[in-house]
Image: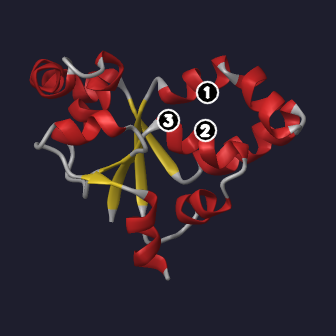
Amino acid sequence: MRIIVDANIIFAALVKDLVTRRILFHPMFEFFVPDYVFEEINNNMQIIIKKTGMSENEIRTLLNMLKDNIFSFSYSFYKKKIKEAKKIIGKYDRKDIPYIALALSTKVGGIWTNDKHFLKQKKIRILKTEELLKFIE
């Protein structure tokens, strides 16, 4: 199953969430993100270090392992769908426009996120951790 993964899920996996990590490493899934997600994570590295107590090297090692299972798509891949994505999610959270645009540009099962505002739109299926866990148990 192909799934777009929100940055908050990757943050959770880096901080401590073993269930989230288990899903992200499961071979049943292919995960996709807009290209800026890893930059956002790098920009918040100090917060992750504080929350985990891990060293930056340990976090980067885990992040690199996660990157091996997450495909990043450049803006040029999904830019044709930005306008449509703005109409769908822009009034709720403009930062999430790339996720919707990427979903509209690919064949995916949905977007995995913990952000409740995604549920306000009806165009793209939103997946919760519990739902994905059922697939692998």
User: In the figure, residue 129 lies in which quadrant?
Assistant: bottom left
Spatial CA span between label 1 and label 3: 8 Å
The residue where tag 2 is placed is 11
Instruction: Give above or below for 20 relative to 14.
Output: below
Residue 105 seen anywhere in this rendered image of the structure = no
Instruction: Give above or below for 46 relative to 4.
Output: above
Amino acid bearing label 2? Phe
Residue at point 41%, 38% (across, down): 33
The residue where tag 3 is placed is 7
Q: How many marks?
A: 3
Spatial CA span between label 1 and label 2: 7 Å
The picture places residue 113, in percent across and down from the top left corner, at: 40, 45
Instruction: Give above or below for 83 relative to 74.
Output: above
Residue at point 67%, 61% (across, down): 18
- Whether pointer 3 and pointer 2 mark residues with C-beta atoms closer than 8 Å, the reply is yes
Spatial CA span between label 3 and label 2: 6 Å
Question: Which element type, helix, strand or loop, lies under badge 1?
Answer: helix
Amino acid bearing label 3? Ala
From the viewer's side, name the closer residue of 61 and 40.
Answer: 40
The residue where tag 1 is placed is 41
The picture places residue 94, in percent across and down from the top left corner, at: 29, 16
Left or right of 123 on screen, residue 12? right
Residue at point 61%, 65% (across, down): 22
